[in-house]
Amino acid sequence: MADPRLEILERRLANVRKIIAVSSGKGGVGKSVTSVVLALALRDRRFKVGLLDLDFTSPSTHVILGVRDLQPIEDYGIIPPVAGGLSYMSIVFYAFDNPAPLRGLDVSNSLIELMAITRWGELDYLIIDMPPGLGDATLDVIRLVKNISFLIVTTPSILAFETVKKLVNLLNSLKTPILGVVENMVMDDKGRIRGEVDKLGVRYLGEIAYDAGLEASMGSVEKLKGTRFYVSLERILKGLL
Amino acid sequence: MHEWALAEGIISKADRIAIENNLEITDIVIQIGELQQIDDEILQFALEQLRTDNMKKARFTLETIKAKLKCRACGEEWRLDLSSLDEESSEAVHFVPEMAHVYIKCPRCGSPDFEVLEGRGVWLASVRGVRKDG
């Protein structure tokens, strides 16, 4: 028996020029904030940008963006609502504030379902906020989304970087392009992570200093754009484009 | 999943089968899990509207598979009563059936950790036709 969802998934992304999965080996490294700010910074450069939160069990981009009272529009599928100038899609539109206890197969099915119904239309960039690690969502986007590339976020911690090595290894073995590594929450730069990233043969995109003011900007796109985090990521983006 | 999105996927897959096998399709059977809460009339209408030249006279048959769940915590098996869901929850499960884990609990022990044994997903069960080259 054939699954008709897989037929349309590819078509839904046909008019998206570039798809970037923002990923990490471990949680808590600032991956979701990086996803949101990257999307906003691209939008500020007049690109058409979409943001998809695939962290189903712990979604947070809606909190960062301050999404309230928005719902997708039903029209031959689903049209994502606009938040902060971004076409925005998240499981929170269906789970709301409730926990979503999903096992692996459920994660895969939710991902396929959401990607099959969402009509992004024409986009220059689709930024995907991934759950951390090498689980089902990561394997599924690699399997199902053609032309995807990964941007990896780490902190200076050896614990975080240890998992980055595994992620890079997996992506390389699956021949999935890696844009590079962003080092977040840097407090005392000794260039150690930069050296380690070089050893992996991956591009070190730049560092973002620990920004104590970031927390106060959660929920406000305007405040986010005034943070040092935003300025640093904007500088990194310049090198990426 | 939305009926139109679903119809688009079904037609696209069936059309591909027709092209690959040089078929004029006569019958398409679609199995629909109850959890999807598909409106058969809308789906049938969407299929009629989207049908391609390779299936001009094809008959679409929709079969609903009742939902059967099994609790992973206590082993309870039960048939789902979707009418017990409020409108918002029902809508969420309609678009993303895995949201059942958010809104449905085991009737015996209250756990949301259950398995959908039957009645999830939409499947192109069979495609029949005659070869165009006779």
Image: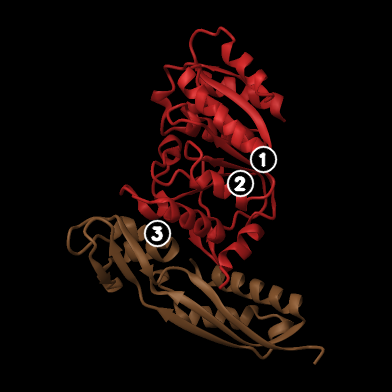
The residue that disc 3 covers is: B98
The residue that disc 1 covers is: A176
Chain assignment, label 2: A
Q: In 3D space, how far apart are the residues under numbered discs 3 and 2 (Cα atoms)?
A: 21 Å
C-beta proximity under 8 Å, tags 3 and 1: no
Q: In 3D space, how far apart are the residues under numbered discs 3 and 1 (Cα atoms)?
A: 28 Å
- Count numbered badges in the picture: 3
C-beta proximity under 8 Å, tags 3 and 2: no
Few, some or many residues within 10 Å of mark 2 (<14, 14–19, 20+): some
Q: Residue at x 61, y 46 (%)?
A: A142
Residue A226 seen by the camera: no
Few, some or many residues within 10 Å of mark 3 (<14, 14–19, 20+): many
Q: In which quadrant is the N terminus of chain A drawn?
A: bottom right
State the image coordinates of residue A76 (x, y, percent, origin top left).
56, 67
Few, some or many residues within 10 Å of mark 1 (<14, 14–19, 20+): some
What element does badge 2 sit on? Answer: helix
Q: In 3D space, how far apart are the residues under numbered discs 1 and 2 (Cα atoms)?
A: 7 Å
Q: Are marks 3 and 1 on the same chain?
A: no
- What chain is colored red? A
The disc label shown at residue A152, or none: none
Chain assignment, label 1: A
Q: Amino acid at mark 1?
A: Thr
Q: Residue at x 56, y 60 (%)?
A: A116
Q: In which quadrant is the C terminus of chain A drawn?
A: top right
Q: Does A206 appear above or below A129?
A: above
- What chain is colored brown? B
Relative to B4, is B14 on the left or the right? right
C-beta proximity under 8 Å, tags 1 and 2: yes
The residue that disc 2 covers is: A142
